[in-house]
Image (cartoon, rainbow, N blue to C red):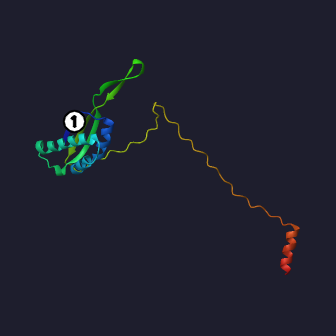
Amino acid sequence: MEVRSIYKTARVSPKKARDVAREIQGLPVSEALDALTFTPRKAAFLIGKTLKSAIANAENNHDLSADNLVVKEANVSSGPSFRRFKPRARGSASAILKRTSHIAIILSDEITIEEKPQRKKSTTKVDGRKAAPKKTAPAKEEKAPEPEEIEETPVAEAAAEEEDKA
């Protein structure tokens, strides 16, 4: 059985919270709580609150034991952004986005967790065009040095004959 808990409009950037949420996916609940307790980030505290809420939902609403629960999914999606403005030069202003997140945690009492298949790298560029195939340098064929014929000079021949005589 699956149990879920959702924390809406958490005041943390979704990009920062996703790093923490990925760490607890697939872990048993006790290990996930330990990991979040010792992670010194604001997102870890908020995800920990959501995880504790999901555990309480499982125990009180569905009569499940917390010892058998596993974190099946930990999703972080973007929520509404607060817009603030900062004064800039020459009377202008620039917008600052204070981002929020929706944190959803799904617990399961089933031990088997399906792992997501890894995605293949895309061959398209950012603007939608196909990437050019990588060019490889042609392999240089090194020729083995040809054995040179050594011509014996008359002086070398005479020295060789003297050695034979001796």
- Residue 105 relative to residue 133: left or right: left
Q: Quadrant of residue 58?
A: top left
Above or below for 151 versus 55:
below
Q: Position of residue 161 (x, y in %)?
A: 86, 75
Q: Quadrant of residue 17?
A: top left
Above or below for 64 versus 166:
above
Q: Position of residue 121 (x, y in %)?
A: 43, 41
Question: Which residue appears at 48% of the width and 31% of the height?
Answer: 129
- Residue 116 relative to residue 131: left or right: left
Quarter occupied by the C terminus: bottom right
Label 1: state its secondary structure: strand
Question: Which residue appears at 14% of the width and 47% of the height?
Answer: 64
- Residue 119 relative to residue 41: left or right: right
Q: Position of residue 63 (x, y in %)?
A: 11, 46
Q: Quadrant of residue 100?
A: top left
Q: Nearer the viewer, residue 87 or 72?
A: 87
| Residue at mark 1 | 7
Crowding around mark 1 (Cα neighbors within 10 Å: few <14, some 14 to 19, many 20+) is some
The amino acid type, in three-letter code, at marker 1 is Tyr
- Residue 152 relative to residue 133: left or right: right
Question: Which residue appears at 86% of the width and 80% of the height?
Answer: 165
